[in-house]
Amino acid sequence: MNLNEKYLEACGIVHAVIQKDVFTFIVMESRFTETKNTNKEILKDVKTAVSNGFFEFEHFHSESDVFGFVIPGMKKHWINTLYLKHYPSWHIAGHIVHELMHAMGYTHKRKYKRKLSVPYQMGEIVRHIGKFTYAKKYNGNERQFRFSDPGPIEA
């Protein structure tokens, strides 16, 4: 699978995950920092962002810890090929949602609490549901399902 196909597969995983009841349940039960929005508003925002379509995306290469980024006001997502090559599609799906939340104006300014911010939490929720829906253990290693064969999620 080339990098463009992998990115598109990750977008498909995002679409599938946000439709799941378990996604809605987890978002509604989460505690978010650095926002005045309610969980219901955050859920509506992510579903609106996904239904409006994804970013145009562009690759860049860096040995840094930067997975990717967006610039507010632009509908473009830059993603580091270092990570795009080595992470499974379900992990990239979490990153896409993280960046979508930034594009919608959510931030994580305080480093010590950023894991509870909307971008980080929403990315983690999608990543975890995506992992348990679209990946399986095979001889002790993570092996990714093809998106067309997701299998059931186990609660």
Image (tube, rainbow, N blue to C red):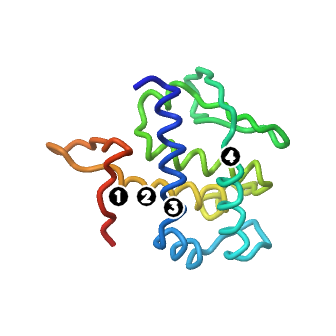
Spatial CA span between label 1 and label 4: 24 Å
Q: Which mark is residue 125?
A: 3
Spatial CA span between label 2 and label 3: 5 Å
Spatial CA span between label 4 and label 3: 20 Å
Q: Residue visible at 46% across and 72% down?
A: 22
Spatial CA span between label 1 and label 2: 6 Å
The residue under label 1 is which amino acid type?
Phe
The residue under label 3 is which amino acid type?
Ile
Q: Quadrant of the C terminus?
A: bottom left
Which SS class for mark 1? helix
Residue in the foreground of this view, choosing between 92 and 63: 92
Q: Which residue is mark 1?
A: 132
The image shows residue 150, relative to residue 30, as above or below, that is: above
Residue 7 in picture, x, y percent from top left: 52, 35
Residue 95 in picture, x, y percent from top left: 57, 45
| Discs 2, 3 touching: Cβ within 8 Å | yes
Callout 3 crowding tier (Cα within 10 Å): few <14, some 14–19, many ≥20: many
Callout 1 crowding tier (Cα within 10 Å): few <14, some 14–19, many ≥20: some
Q: Quadrant of the N terminus?
A: top left
The image shows residue 72, relative to residue 114, as above or below, that is: above
| Discs 2, 4 touching: Cβ within 8 Å | no
Q: Quadrant of residue 142 in the image?
A: top left
Spatial CA span between label 1 and label 3: 11 Å
Q: Which residue is mark 4?
A: 53
Q: Which mark is residue 128?
A: 2
